[in-house]
Image (tube, coloured by chain):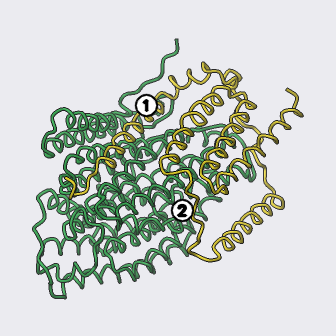
Amino acid sequence: MTPMVEALIFILMAIAAIAGAVTVVMARNPVYSAMGLLGTLFSVAVLYVLQLAHMVAAVQVIVYAGAVLTLFLFVIMLIGVDKSEDRDEKLPGQRLVIAVLAGAVVLIAGGLTFFADFDWVPAASAPINPDLTNGTVQAVAEPLFTDWVLAFEATALLLTIAAAGAIALAHYRRRSQE
Amino acid sequence: MITPEIQWIAILPEIALAAGAAAVLLIEVQWKPAANRLGWVAGISFALAMAFTIVQWLTASDALAVGQIGSLLGFSGMVLMDGFAVFGRLALLAIMGLGLMSGWRFVTGLGRRGAESIALILLATAGFSIMIASNNLVMMFLGLEVGSISLYVLAGMTRDTSRSDEAAMKYFLLGSFASAIFIYGVALLYAGTGRFDVLGMRGFFSGVIVTAPAVILIGIALVIVGLGFKVSAAPFHSWAPDVYQGAPAGITGYMAAMAKVAGFLAIARILITGLPQYEQSWAPVLAGVAALSMAIGAFMALVQSDVRRLLAYSGVAHAGFIMTGLVGGTFTGMLFYVAVYALQLVGAFAIVAAVSGSASSASDIDDYRGLVRRSPVLAVSLAVLLLGMAGLPLTSGFVAKFGVFAEAWAGGFEWLVILGVLTSVVTFAFYLRVIVMMFMEESESDLAAPSTPVRWAVGLAVLGTVLFGILPEPLLRLAADAFPL
């Protein structure tokens, strides 16, 4: 793939990802928000493919675009699709204040970037192992179960907490019902 | 066939805690025993973890004595077994023991959900313990999440009052946001160095000369923001008063102390061990956060009418004092301070739980009026703990404050030390206000006697506060020996 094509795909997908993210926040109907999220997730998956991380891209599509988004849609349907969002704001002018503050942060960060003498990335980064950059399942699995085995096990703790926590919070009954 | 490197000794305490949590959950499912039986299981797992930690300390000092530093790295450099990690584990386990004792009435009051709360307490300790022992920043993030998510759930365990729901929700949303900021910082540090491990980062920077790499500076800033939230340092503290007030009193002290100890040890590990070459960049930032925390915490605490909000804002001020110990690039004062402060915090919240009810979501300062008439022991204990927090001489708080201020002064941050001494005087004002209310005014209502575990927890906290104030030498020496690799 020539750098030209790579840059073109990156720009297209980056625009699609940002457009999806904006839809998530701006759409009045929650189903449209979920669809916007789907667009963002797919575009980011393409970006992963561009980085030769095929495994991560596949996981992104299967887990996020597939399972997580379906769950979101379930919840939206259960709560009721036709309820549109109430946008009355309790604090008048908060958007203006936030816009000014965010603009100031962007200006300061931009000014620092352009006028201060920064190297973005240190000159000599650690050499990258070419075997690890082909993004196949094997290339992901091998470090996962050798060098990163403890991290893998720690995520098991996380799942235990998720299960125990969900039970602890959901199992609650008000005193009167017991 | 490649086999992973496994050093069991490096994670034995966490295994004991996780196995204890699993045992509690399974025994609950199978036999539905009385809560006290489950308490014994938790106690055994605590004792095993403590024993393994002491074995680790001995192994680590042996290995250092013969210079075999490599043997302290475990799991391909994922975790470290240095004195720093072991000291942190001792502190975390001590907090867990006291927290279980002081929260026991709350746990039994939950009925059948008590087992989950015990398991979550054990797992939170295991998570924070992994966090302070990690060399790898991804591992540190996982430990942070294991600990934090358990705490979010624990904050919402009582759902009788909407305040508890509010506290859990606020803690969860803002905490997740802070975790995301932290992991973004880690990603940027990785982008700049190609390294996830703290020791590798230090090695990288000692080999390469970089002038002002933006990704690394932004990464450092994001890591400080993410962890600053966890230790409730200003300006990332706004969640703390609401969460401390809303969460069930029996467990709040444990939650607050855990997050403080683990957060500060992680900050010290990343900045002092991993990025000492950037001290010029991060030390002024830490000094600014410390100054802001001390000022905001001390002055906001003056106007609180709820004892738990008061303790929360004083916790913000203490986060500033503890951070003062880090600006000089040293850690002994920080370790001593965070250990004795955690002890005082758990003790104080145990008393709050005894006075206001262990599942309550508010503790108005009027409840403490004339406490000495109703329960002289609790009143005197709370007075000792509050004076310890204020830093009265002959309490551990004084030695701790002296230690961090001396280190910051030696590090060239004289202005910060002067500000710290001034705000310490302000903190006396609100601690004394509570003490005066307890001793000088008339009582209005009756109070049930605290349960035996609470008495033990309070007694140990008071004993520690006085003992480390009069004889700080052993703990100071332990903290000085507990240097990171």
Query: B28 or A31, which lies in front?
Result: A31
Q: Is residue A64 above or below residue A115?
A: above
Point 55% across, 64% down: residue: B411
Say which residue label 2 marks. Answer: B327
Say which residue label 1 marks. Answer: A153
**Spot occupied by residue B113 in the image (x, y as percentages of width and height):** 24, 47
Q: State which quadrant residue B348 falls in.
A: bottom left
- The single residue placed furthest to the top in the displayed view is B1
Q: State if disc 1 and disc 2 touch (CB < 8 Å).
A: no
Q: Is residue B402 visible?
A: no
Q: Is residue B75 above or below residue B50?
A: above
**Spot occupied by residue B482 in the image (x, y as percentages of width and height):** 40, 48
Label 2 element class: loop
Query: Which chain does yellow denote in the image?
Result: A
**Spot occupied by residue A156 in the image (x, y as percentages of width and height):** 41, 33
User: Which of pointers 2 and 1 indicates the residue nearer the eye?
Assistant: 1
Q: Amino acid at mark 1?
A: Glu
**Spot occupied by residue B301 in the image (x, y as percentages of width and height):** 40, 78
| Chain at numbered mark 1 | A
Query: A95 or B394, which lies in front?
Result: A95
| Chain at numbered mark 2 | B
- The residue carrying pointer 2 sits among few (fewer than 14), some (14 to 19) or many (20 or more) residues within 10 Å by Cα, namely many
| Labels 2 and 1 in the same subunit | no
Label 1 element class: helix
Q: State which quadrant residue B163 falls in.
A: bottom left
- Chain B painted colour: green
